[in-house]
Image (spheres, rainbow, N blue to C red):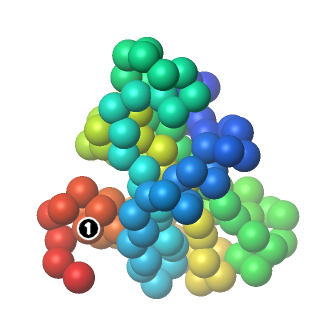
Amino acid sequence: MLPTENRLRRREDFATAVRRGRRAGRPLLVVHLRSGATDPHAPGESASPTCAGFVVSKAVGGAVVRNKVKRRLRHLMRDRLTLLPPGSLVVVRALPGAGDADHAQLARDLDAALQRLLGGGAR
């Protein structure tokens, strides 16, 4: 489970990550990353923890499939939060193929997208 302090909950934070962040697309998911050293809602504060949020639409599947995909993505992001700069906002959007993918396929796509966003991969 993703710790409470690392969960993206506010609509404004989702919008900030998607509109002002960088994007990397993969066959199963799209990752939006807004890296920042401070909390955008508390100027002058120290670096806030990295927060992650997930968007899984009905195009992925029924409620059971969507929840399964969200659980897998939360578990995968928990292990990768330390790779991201403090104060980052991450939004992971699952694409329709994610409902049929297994854990390893989701992990591969998430790792490739994060590597590209952090500057380790070519276009």
Q: Residue furthest top?
A: 45
Image quarter hosting the C terminus: bottom left
Image quarter hosting the N terminus: top right
Q: Would you identify the image quadrant in which residue 116 lies?
A: bottom left
Closer-to-camera residue (100/10): 10
- Rendering coords of residue 47 (x, y %): 37, 23
Which residue sits at x=46%, y=64%? 31
Can the viewer see residue 71 in this picture?
no
Q: Is residue 22 above or below residue 34?
A: below
Closer-to-camera residue (55/28): 55
Closer-to-camera residue (5/76): 5
- Rendering coords of residue 7 (x, y %): 59, 35
Which residue sits at x=43%, y=77%? 25
Which residue sits at x=29%, y=38%? 85
**SS of the residue at dot 1?**
helix
Q: Which residue is mark 1?
A: 116
- Rendering coords of residue 27 (x, y %): 46, 84
- Rendering coords of residue 11 (x, y %): 72, 46
* Identity, as a three-letter code, of the amino acid under mark 1: Arg
Can the viewer see residue 88 in this picture?
yes
Q: Residue furthest front?
A: 43
**For residue 13, side relative to residue 47 (left or right):** right
- Label count reads 1
Which residue sits at x=17%, y=78%? 122
Mark 1 closeness class: few <14, some 14–19, many ≥20 residues within 10 Å:
some
